[in-house]
Image (cartoon, rainbow, N blue to C red):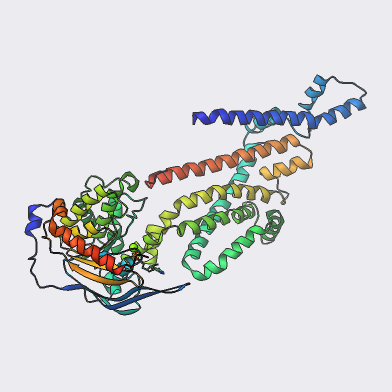
Amino acid sequence: MRQSILPVLTVVLIILGIWYLAAAWMNATWTLQQAERAEQTLTTVEVLQDTMQQDRPKLPAPHQVAVELWETTAEKKITSKRSLVYHGWITLSATLLGFAIGTGLGILLAVGIVHNRAMDMSVMPWAIASQTIPILAIAPMIIVVLNSVGVTGLLPKAFISAYLSFFPVVVGMVKGLRSPAPMQLDLMRTYSASQSQVFWNLRLPASVPFLFTSLKVGIAASLVGAIVGELPTGAVAGLGARLLAGSYYGQTIQIWSALIAAAVLAASLVGIVSLLERLTLHKMGMRT
Amino acid sequence: MLSQTEIDGFAAPDAAPEAVIEARDLQLVFETSDGPVQALKDINLTIEKGEFVSFIGPSGCGKTTFLRAVAGLEKPTGGTLTVNGMTPDEARRARAYGYVFQAAGLYPWRSIARNVRLPLEIMGYSKADQESRVKKVLQLVDLEGFERKYPWQLSGGMQQRASIARALAFDAEILLMDEPFGALDEIVRDHLNEQLLALWARTEKTIGFVTHSIPEAVYLSTKIVVMSPRPGRITDVIPNTLPKERPLDIRDTPEFLEIAHRVREGLRAGHAYD
Ligand SMILES: Nc1ncnc2c1ncn2[C@@H]1O[C@H](COP(=O)(O)OP(=O)(O)O)[C@@H](O)[C@H]1O
Ligand SMILES: [Mg+2]
């Protein structure tokens, strides 16, 4: 652990350095135009200073994003429409619901595929086809269709989330349920074990490591799905809505802080799944 | 390893012989993409109750296939094969045999005790019965105290012993073992051979044992079946005249070497070294 801190810190510093340079370079044009209009001449230091504190910079400097993040999380009541925690929670709840639906659906499909030849032949091509359709194209349709039948709010977003997250779960679970070696299956046959005994005693436990790998991909995909689901709705709440509103009004600082919040959320979710994975495998007695 | 009560419980060795496994003109052909492979041709063999029969022969001569056919894992394409007078499938449902594979194949998510318990859970033994049987067979293979360990915490030899315990747990009369010690080093193997012999004497099982090793076959068996490939067939059946009581150094006696010599001759005759 300790050895990995130094390289990570180095990378973070390099990224921040590049970010600052890019901010100065991208925002300088506007600073110089303004100065020209006002018929002023600025020193290099004055130009640089201005690029770091514009209201609507092309690329906000890291500290501007940091300040915005602080103000919209720590300094706002979490029920406030301006609180990033509030928006984050809206997105998170759709993510978790969608993840639960997607995971459940994925596991059920995988169990069907492994045990039923007809499903094996028919489901997988459709599952693959479903993932080749760009989510941005299909998200508005899902929302509109569901709205017209009276389903609004959390559920449509959760469906888009589930749409993205069931696929890695199906693929991983099918692989996991099929992972027992022929010898392991033969052993079960020598006990005259039933199909359901083979499932509960062999296939399912053997699939657990595969499941967790899929869940890590799936939960990140769920978050993307929830955010995408917030874009076409004219939604007023959620990280996706913050991104969209920010881009309408040129509030680049708001966009970037919503982006960072989404990234932190994704990393935390994947981290939680990894932790659960370690605990589960440890509890099952498997060497991790 | 042997306790007095168990020696006393021994059945008389000269009880009337009773065929447990019987193969008559057994054929088994695999249909592969390269055409049919005759894995077993005209196999005639009788294994009596309480015998320890070793199968020896070069790779591909059908040793595994024969054992799997006995276990009902492969379907013969001709002839007859009976186990305790039943078809292999019926015998399996009657829990006639335990099967030990070349790899221990313990479930990594189950402790040693729970691995041994697996067949008992599947066959629906009561909790109390499971408990006492697991305790008994773990004692039999000298693994008391390792109940709560997980497979990766045990050496290869100990894992294989646990898999033997698993095959013994439900009191099958027949033990089928396919190169169970093949992947172990020689010292561990010697030790396990000694233990297996003691276990056989104590439990009176009928054992079918596949091996690559001539000394192992001669040391363990009452009967050695020599096989040769393409097509898989039996070339010699050698009765073993060594006494039942066999210390490890019996392997240096002239009688032992004589039987080993006959096995080697049988292998040579059946195998054109191409
Ligand atoms: N499932 C199978 N399908 C096709 N051929 C097989 C199969 N199992 C075994 N064989 C063939 O049958 C022959 C005997 O194999 P096997 O019984 O495994 O030999 P051994 O155990 O003596 O090495 C070999 O030629 C092998 O390639
Ligand atoms: Mg073999």
Image region (quadrant) for ligand 1: bottom left
Q: Position of residue A46 (x, y in %)?
A: 81, 20
Left or right of residue A140, residue B17 in this image:
left
Q: Quadrant of residue A139?
A: bottom right
Indicate whether A283 appears above or below B130: above
Numbered label tally: 0
Indicate whether B106 appears above or below B210: above
Q: In terms of depth relative to the viewer, which is nearer, A241 or B243?
A: B243
Indicate whether B274 appears above or below A280: below
Q: Position of residue A4 (x, y in %)?
A: 53, 31
Q: Position of residue B130 (x, y in %)?
A: 24, 57
Q: Quadrant of residue B131?
A: bottom left
- Residue at image position (61%, 61%) is A128
Residue A96 in view, yes or no: no
- Residue at image position (28%, 53%) is B160
Q: Position of residue A126 (x, y in %)?
A: 61, 64
Q: In terms of depth relative to the viewer, which is nearer, A263 or B76?
A: B76
Give the quadrant of the C terminus of chain A: top left
Left or right of residue A65, residue B181 in this image:
left
Residue A246 in view, yes or no: yes
Left or right of residue B252, residue A277 in this image:
right
